[in-house]
Amino acid sequence: DADVTQTPRNRITKTGKRIMLECSQTKGHDRMYWYRQDPGLGLRLIYYSFDVKDINKGEISDGYSVSRQAQAKFSLSLESAIPNQTALYFCATSVRGTVQETQYFGPGTRLLVL
Amino acid sequence: DAKTTQPPSMDCAEGRAANLPCNHSTISGNEYVYWYRQIHSQGPQYIIHGLKNNETNEMASLIITEDRKSSTLILPHATLRDTAVYYCIVRPYGSGNTGKLIFGQGTTLQVKP
């Protein structure tokens, strides 16, 4: 969905490096999420944010941090990357208060940690 | 959130209906059933959701059993582009809704010519 963009789309980094994955949305949604996906598995929630001042840990937040710089931007950081953080990372957005509260996903960032 | 159980894989002939089952025997009264799909490592895409009544939209139909312990997603005329991993998710609505989606491993649907 072009309304949710992620940069970079692909990234190779080395163990110990700090990297940042960025997510931007033009949908005007208040909620944003970061997920990771390992091969053959479903997505797992890393962090989520209900608004700029409300950030929450998900299932697997260890080794990650986030920043909600504005309603439209939600960044995920790996302070010191390790090989088992090699995965496909997705950002998603949604609007609070609707029954379906559909989540709209970005195209993903493929990260390889050597 | 309630746990769901889906078969790991299914095949379907192109043009035929694809029926994807999901078991959610521990679903609570305030939990909806949602279906998403993921096509070849793209971001997941919302398909449909329901509480207790059957639902239909332009993409699919959702049949929920009367006891709500299971459901079936129906793609009425599957095409090759419907080949994807399909996720069945249950999630509360109302004060219990944090917006989070808990993904299982889903069902890989292969549509064959």
Image: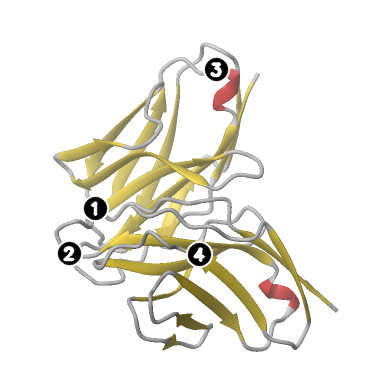
The answer for which chain carries disc 2 is: B
Gap in angstroms between the C-alphas marked 1 and 2: 9 Å
- Residue hosting label 1: B98
Amino acid at circle 3: Ile
Side of A5 where A57 appears, left or right: left
The answer for which chain carries disc 1 is: B
Q: Secondary structure at mark 3?
A: loop
Q: Position of residue B74 (x, y in %)?
A: 58, 82
Q: Secondary structure at mark 1?
A: loop
Gap in angstroms between the C-alphas marked 3 and 2: 38 Å
Amino acid at circle 4: Asn
Depth-wise, is mark 4 or mark 2 nearer the camera? 4
Gap in angstroms between the C-alphas marked 4 and 2: 23 Å
Residue A77, placed above or below residue A40: above
Q: Secondary structure at mark 2?
A: loop
Residue B80, placed above or below residue B109: below
- Residue hosting label 2: B94
Q: Nearer the viewer, residue B22 or B56?
A: B22
Q: Kindly identify the residue that appears in the image at 37 percent across and 29 percent down.
A: A61
Depth-wise, is mark 4 or mark 1 nearer the camera? 4
Depth-wise, is mark 3 or mark 4 nearer the camera? 4
Task: Name the image quarter holding residue B90.
Answer: bottom left
- Residue hosting label 3: A82
Mark 2: few, some, or many residues within 10 Å (few <14, many ≥20)?
few
Do marks 3 and 2 both belong to one polypeptide chain? no
Q: How many marks?
A: 4
Q: Position of residue B112 (x, y in %)?
A: 82, 74
Circle 4/circle 2 CB separation < 8 Å = no
Q: Residue furthest top?
A: A16
Circle 1/circle 2 CB separation < 8 Å = no
Chain-order first, disc 4 or disc 1: 4
Depth-wise, is mark 1 or mark 3 nearer the camera? 1
